[in-house]
Image (cartoon, grey):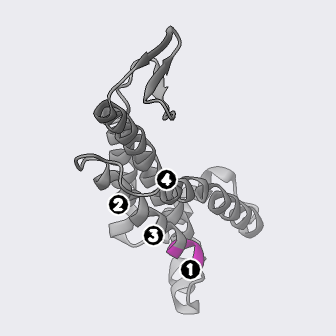
Amino acid sequence: MRLIVLWCALALAASMAVFVDSFLSAAPHMPGLVLFTAVVGFFPVVAIIVATVALRRSELPVATIVPRLLRLLPAALRWGAPAVTVGAAVIAVLAGPQVPDGVPETTPGGYPMDTRTGDFPISAGEYLHAQAENRRLFAAVAIALNTAAGTGAFALRPQSRSRRLLQS
């Protein structure tokens, strides 16, 4: 689980870097692979966490799993992780793409905006602005997902015997 927590922390840092980069002039500067890895890497992490919870689960009802995991977290994570997750989700909604009905695509002849109603040319500045908005959205989503997954993995980490006795 420590490796998963480390992965989530690195993915969170990469997502934050992409998010901050999206606000700089002439953004985006960072390679798309950084953000792609942070978003796609979330899915195996969730699969491992779900499998771990399923294998460790006792005969207690499923409704008690989350409260039991929350008790295993330090107070800062218990309140901080949900706040970061919700905050990133709100930022994703507010700072997401404002591009009307389409996504810009680069072609050798320029920058067309492909929409449902047809194609129209856009400037290089408009193209970069639309790309930065798209990356901002996916970075905020990656921040929310990796914070939630990292917190879950941290709660499931192996504990010392004395701490387990105190939790019982």
Quadrant including the N terminus: bottom right
Between discs 3 and 2, the one toward the N terminus: 3
Kind of residue at badge 1: Arg
Crowd rating for badge 4 (residues with CA inside 10 Å; few <14, some 14–19, many 20+): few
> Marks 4 and 2: CB-CB under 8 Å?
no
Magenta extent? 2-6
Is 111 or 84 nearer to us in this picture? 111
Between discs 1 and 3, the one toward the N terminus: 1
Which label lies toward us, 1 or 4? 4
The residue drawn where x is 33% and y is 60% is 80
In the picture, measured across the screen, residue 94 lies left or right of residue 2, that is left
Distance between the alpha carbons at the discs numbered 2 and 1: 23 Å
The residue drawn where x is 58% and y is 57% is 42
* Residue 152 % position (x, y): 54, 63
Q: Find disc 2 in the rendering and name its residue.
A: 17
Q: Find disc 3 in the rendering and name its residue.
A: 9
Distance between the alpha carbons at the discs numbered 1 and 4: 27 Å
